[in-house]
Amino acid sequence: FDGRFVAFWGAWGTEIRTITIQCPNEGNKARVADCKANHPNGYAAEVPLHQGIFVHDTRTQQTRAVAKAPADFDDFVYWNYSGMVPGTGESDDAGEPARWRSASFVAVSGLVDGEIDDAVFHAAFKARKGTFGEGPWVGPIDGIYLTRGPGSSPFAVVVRTGMAGTVVDPAAVAFSDVTGTSSPLPITEMGLERDGFRGDLLAVNVGMGNEEAGFAGIYLTLVPEDDP
């Protein structure tokens, strides 16, 4: 919520897909072990087939869909195994037991053009494209996208998995002992907070890496009035 516009995730209908999510291999060791002990074959997550990112104008009382699945993307729901592991004093969820949790990521700003009294807004959101079969995603591509409303607008790519990390940070390179040269690290993950879009400034976190090196940071970018 930026003072006028409210951005949110929503789903409709009764059709669902069951996606198998594997436990992480990195992170808190006790939590990773707890996940694998409770879900050795992965976690079967039920995800609505029809879902989307919406923006509601509190002045005009109009609600608009800015992105939909499966029309524009394939999924907006992301999963994380978090919480307190039995027998440990560590927790990132105020003492709640460790379990799989889902979340969607979107932020909105009506002040990219410096004017809150008009109906123009920009929305940034995280979304996935990929092939879904019986089990896990096949070849998923995650990204943070930007669009403008009201009305239809193309989706501008802010960051996307597989892109060269040097797109957001010139220092995201790794030296290879084999070839003796440096090359950009690919983007592997990204994040967006609900308060990460204020005025014409958008903040995201980006991780880059390969089997030999890793790099990450929080980045701030200026969103032009006519973008995307």
Image (cartoon, rainbow, N blue to C red):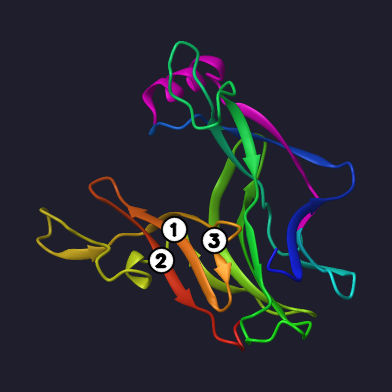
Q: Is residue 67 visible?
A: no
Residue located beneath label 3 in the image: 143
Disc 1, SS: strand
Q: Is residue 173 above or below residue 113?
A: above
Q: Residue furthest top?
A: 87
Residue located beneath label 1 in the image: 205
Residue 19 position in % (x across, y down): 66, 36
Callout 3 amino acid? Gly
**Residue interval drawn in magenta:** 28-52
State which tag comes first along the sequence, 1 or 3.
Answer: 3
Residue located beneath label 2 in the image: 219
Disc 2, SS: strand
Residue 184 figure quarter: bottom left
Query: Which of 203/186 is in front?
Result: 203
In this rendering, would 168 be left or right of 66?
Answer: left
Residue 21 position in % (x across, y down): 58, 33
Disc 3, SS: strand
Marks 2 and 3, how far apart in space?
Answer: 15 Å
Callout 2 amino acid? Tyr
Q: Is residue 45 above or below residue 163?
A: above
Q: Is residue 225 above or below residue 73?
A: below
Callout 1 amino acid? Asn
State which tag comes first along the sequence, 2 or 3.
Answer: 3
Decide whether residue 174 is among the magenta residues: no
Which of labels 2 and 3 is toward the front? 2
Local packing at callout 2 (Cα closer than 10 Å; few below 14, some 14-19, many 20+) is few
Query: Which of 13/130 is in front?
Result: 13
Residue 131 position in % (x across, y down): 63, 50
Which of labels 1 and 3 is toward the front? 1
| Tags 2 and 1 touching, CB below 8 Å | yes
Decide whether residue 40 is among the magenta residues: yes
